[in-house]
Image: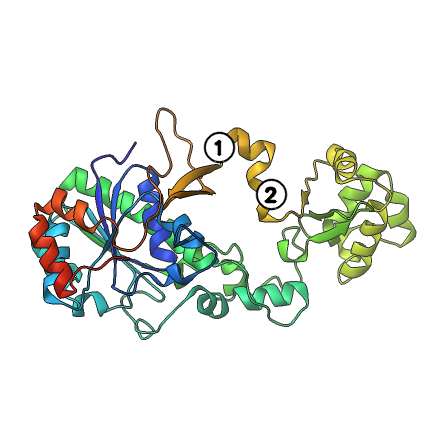
Amino acid sequence: MLLNGIRIIDLTRVVAGPCCTRTLADLGAEVIKIEPPDGDLLRRGVPKVGGVAVGYAQQNAGKQHLSIDLTREEGQALVLELAAGADVLVENYRPGVAARLGLGYEAVRACRPDIVYCSISGYGQTGPAAGRRAYAPVIHAELGLIDLNARERGTDPLPEAVSHADFAVGAQAATGILAALVHRLRTGEGQHLDVSMAETMLAVNEWTAVEANGGFGDEISPFRPGKAALLRFPDGAWIQVPGNPTTWIFGVARALGREDELEARGWTEPRLTQGKDEEIKALMQAWAAEFPTREAFEAALASARIPLGEVKPLAGIADEDWAVARGAFTDIPVGTERIRIPRSPFRIAGAEIGPRSGATTRGCDNRRTLKTLLGRTDADIDTLEASGVLSSE
């Protein structure tokens, strides 16, 4: 495992932070997740297996699970003691909260001068929006994603079904942490990383620079995924053809030998098809309906190197040939049961990548971790549990 020997204190919750530390755990780091007495909010999700929410298990597999009351001085002292032996600390509180809990960067650096401390937040640690609460749907709305989708699709604003901003900022944070660890290896210096969801969504939206510099204007772009054609086949299957249909229609027609139908409509170049999106999609639908299956249509488009994707539910992906061959999913223990979760997007020669353990109930590793890392006795831990500093399910 590439990050063997790297220890991470994980003070994060819900999605953005946990997916960051799950990535580092998959790469071999020892991740110690610390939850409050009422647990990570994601634990309230459904369905549950073995008493653990499946969504929580996906983001927190491969970690040790502690539950410490950080509002108590004794709890803060425990975390600082753990941080003294750690390489990285990750938190995704609102700016200022970690410091109020006695666990801000300066406090942790006093215990571990070369700590790599990563703060994930909605709008960053500085600036007039720093204190605002931010979840992925808020960022989707305020950073242009909802507006752009509505304009491209010609609909009222609609919510996103996936927490894109959380996963995007988690990936950016993991990248920054790895860079900071390399920097520390070279210089001996730690770092405080300030990673914001807002700036991440600017970076991962391919239209940010276009929109910030006046939009498309009269230019015709072939790259308009929000306008992509969705077509249905006689067998009920749906497919999506990428790109802007007002430009891609010419390649589709050429591959199918239907160029004369475009000429009959006076469509000889993309300049003449602009504003005719629905008419063009209807024509493509008529052509697609002549093919019995997605496979036959895809083969017909191959000469023009036009790809397509079948619309599929997530539920069946784990059993697809490519996913089985790649080992895209792995089984993990959850209590006395097992569930399937995504393994990891990484494949690195000579390295085992993915979670090395499952997900457990809140505080399940309190005793083992504190005895192993801090030398606490059973009597010590009994006292901490009796006072409420430690808790478990």
Residue closer to the observer: 337 or 327: 337
**Pick the front one: 219 or 362:** 362
| Mark found first going from the N terminus, 1 or 2 | 2
Determine the image quadrant of residue 69: bottom left
| Label 2: which secondary element | helix
**Which quadrant of the structure image shows residue 107?**
bottom left
Q: Tell me the mark number nearer the camera, choosing from 1 and 2.
A: 2
Mark number for residue 316? 2
Residue under numbered circle 1: 327
Query: 153 and 342: which one is in front?
Result: 342
Query: x, y (%) of residue 244?
Result: 69, 53
Quadrant of image for the N terminus: top left
Which structural element holds mark 1? loop
Q: Residues within 10 Å of mark 1 (few under 14, many from 20)?
A: few
Give the Cα distance between marks 1 and 2: 14 Å
Numbered circles on residues, count: 2
Q: Is residue 375 visible?
A: yes
**Does residue 78 lie above or below 329 as drawn?**
below
Q: Amino acid at mark 2?
A: Gly
Would residue 85 appear left or right of 364 to someone viewing this image?
A: left
Please provide percent x and percent y for residue 369. Answer: 18, 46
Q: Is residue 106 in view?
A: no
Answer with left or right where residue 126 lies relative to residue 100. Answer: right
